[in-house]
Image (tube, grey):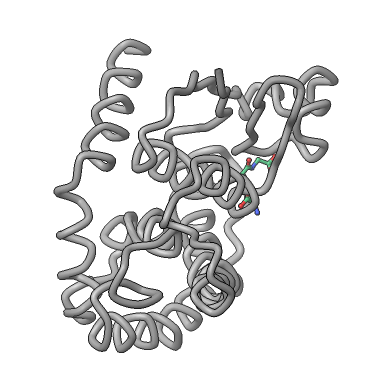
Amino acid sequence: MLTIYALTMSPPALKVLYVANALGLEYEQKGVKLAEGEGQSEQYKRIHPAGKVPALVDGDFTLFESNAIIKYLARKADSALYPDDLKKQAIIDQWVDFVSQHIHNGISRVLWNKMMAPKFGFDVDENSMKCGYEFLEKYLPIVDAQLGKTKYLAGDEISIADYILLAHVDPLEAIEIDVNKYPNLARWREALRTQDFYQRVHKFYGEALMAKG
Ligand SMILES: N[C@@H](CCC(=O)N[C@@H](CS)C(=O)NCC(=O)O)C(=O)O
């Protein structure tokens, strides 16, 4: 049985859960109480040396970094979400890297400073937040333009790049970015959100959150 260490509020963890569900994999999900220091425990650092989520345990094999985990899961399932074809795979990798370097970079700066830092009592870095918004203003139009040309991010077939982008653009409203400025992105996001994998992940989250009270 696979174990995925994940947290409700973490986009990198969310994208792993999206792909695991899209692949129909059975897994056990475990939370890590980062705010209480559990990530830095010796036990968890044997799984993730930096104490972050997500992480994966598959028998005696452990893995961290969300994109590496996603590629591993897709390959293990021999899935067309990450095909063997050299050029198809290279285009998927291109978008995975673009989203991780530019969209994730922008959104995580804003999310941290706008929502998390005040909530957890850390200083807000206004410059970092401004830089995050600038990133998004510069790079979201590129993703939007691509989704105007092809049905999915890396072409007309859905791939891991779509689940990765989705997790990062899920919280756009929370940081007061109107997704309707990006009509192709908005349409693509709505279509993915109606699918089973998304409903399953968020239903689980809802139940888990309610159980915690
Ligand atoms: N590049 C990593 C990022 C993981 C990451 O930064 N996770 C955050 C939550 S979104 C975390 O665990 N932070 C806790 C910490 O840094 O101690 C990935 O994609 O897996």
Residue at 48 percent of width and 83 percent of height: 134
Q: For this view, does 196 lie left or right of residue 145?
A: left
Residue 146 percent coordinates (x, y): 33, 85
- Judged left or right of residue 20, residue 117 is right
Q: Quadrant of residue 163?
A: bottom left
| Res 162 quadrant in image | bottom left
Please tell me which residue is depicted at 32% across the width and 11% down the height of the picture: 211
Going 34% across and 42% down the picture, which residue do you hit? 22
Task: From this view, report whether residue 72 is shown above or below residue 37.
Answer: below
Q: Quadrant of the C terminus?
A: top left
Across the whole image, how many numbered discs are drawn on residues? 0
Note whether 177 is above or below 71 in the view shown: below
Q: Position of residue 15 (x, y in %)?
A: 45, 48
**Quadrant including the N terminus:** top right
Q: Tell me, yes or no, if residue 116 can be seen here.
A: no
Locate residue 65, reporting x and y percent: 67, 48
Residue 169 shows up from this direction: yes
Name the one closer to the observer, 96 or 45. 96
Image position, residue 98 (x, y; %): 54, 76
- Front residue of this view, candidates 94 and 139: 94
Q: Nearer the viewer, residue 166 or 21?
A: 21
Residue lying at 55% horizontally and 38% vertically, measured from the top left: 120
